Image (cartoon, helix red, strand yellow):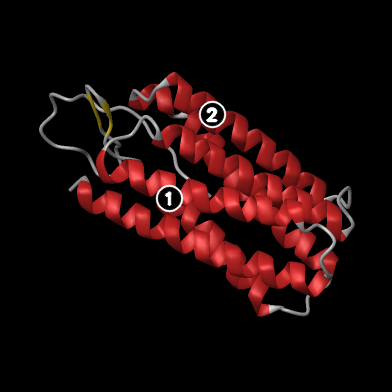
Amino acid sequence: MTAIFGHHHHDDPHHAAGRPAKSATGITAVSPRHLLALGAITVVFGIAVLIWPAATLRLLGVLAGIWLIATGATRIIHALRRDRDGHGLTDQVLSGVLGVVLIIGGVACISRTASGVTAVAVILGLAWLLSGVTAVLLGLFARGSTRWWLLGIGAASIVVGLLFLSWPDLSPRSLVLLTGITALILGTGELSFGWQQRHQLR
């Protein structure tokens, strides 16, 4: 799931590893540390789902719940650390609110509140959709390659989210395969973006 950014003093000639940068006219880099964390969590989730293509809906719900809670917690922790790193309030609020929503969705999946195919598909769809919208909104304030990475990953997340929401009556097996494949693709995209940002900040 996508991206978290912040500010860095423009007069500092060196960007610390994992520290985002911003110029006077827009954000030029995203925190690679958190991109890599979010991408890794999503890739592991995708692989775990694809390992059991015949998994029951209950197992998918548990795996999805763990993934949502892990990504939500990652976003909240990063949001709480932003003041110390000089990050912007808008980014902090977006990351924190999205993190809370993801954790609520994860708890619903694990606690059997979301026990049917439609419920799980809707929760996953909303998670991808909200993550994508957040990335697109942040991308609008970015510059250079960072903007296009954010807009691209955000748009892909939105498409996946809409796919889940518009196709909630698919079979449990189809839901498992669709979840695993999309998580693997989008997680790999986040990892690629994270490595690109890490190289850029060196």
Q: In the rendering, which numbered label is found on residue 188? A: none
Mark 2 element type: helix
Residue 138, x across and y down, in percent = 43, 33
Gap in Å between the C-alphas at discs 2 and 1?
19 Å
Side of 51 where 76 appears, left or right? left
Mark closest to the chain's N terminus, 2 or 1: 2
Q: Residue at x 60, y 35 (%)?
A: 98
Residue 9, x across and y down, in percent = 21, 24
Quick check: 29 above or below 111?
above
Indicate the amino acid at tag 1: Gly
The one nearer the camera, 177 or 87, is: 177
Comparing labels 2 and 1, the label whose residue is closer to the camera: 1
The residue carrying pointer 1 sits among few (fewer than 14), some (14 to 19) or many (20 or more) residues within 10 Å by Cα, namely some
- Residue linked to disc 2: 94
Indicate the amino acid at tag 2: Leu
Quick check: 53 above or below 190?
below
Q: Quadrant of residue 193?
A: bottom left
Side of 102 where 1 appears, left or right? left
Residue that lies at the very extreme toward the left in this rendered image: 13
Mark 1 element type: helix
Residue 134, x across and y down, in percent = 53, 36
The residue carrying pointer 2 sits among few (fewer than 14), some (14 to 19) or many (20 or more) residues within 10 Å by Cα, namely some
Side of 19 where 152 appears, left or right? right
Q: Residue at x 66, y 49 (%)?
A: 68
- Residue linked to disc 1: 152
Quick check: 26 above or below 2?
above
The one nearer the camera, 15 or 144, is: 144
Side of 164 where 47 appears, left or right? left
Q: Residue at x 53, y 33 (%)?
A: 95
Residue 180, x across and y down, in percent = 64, 68
Residue 72 in view in this figure: yes
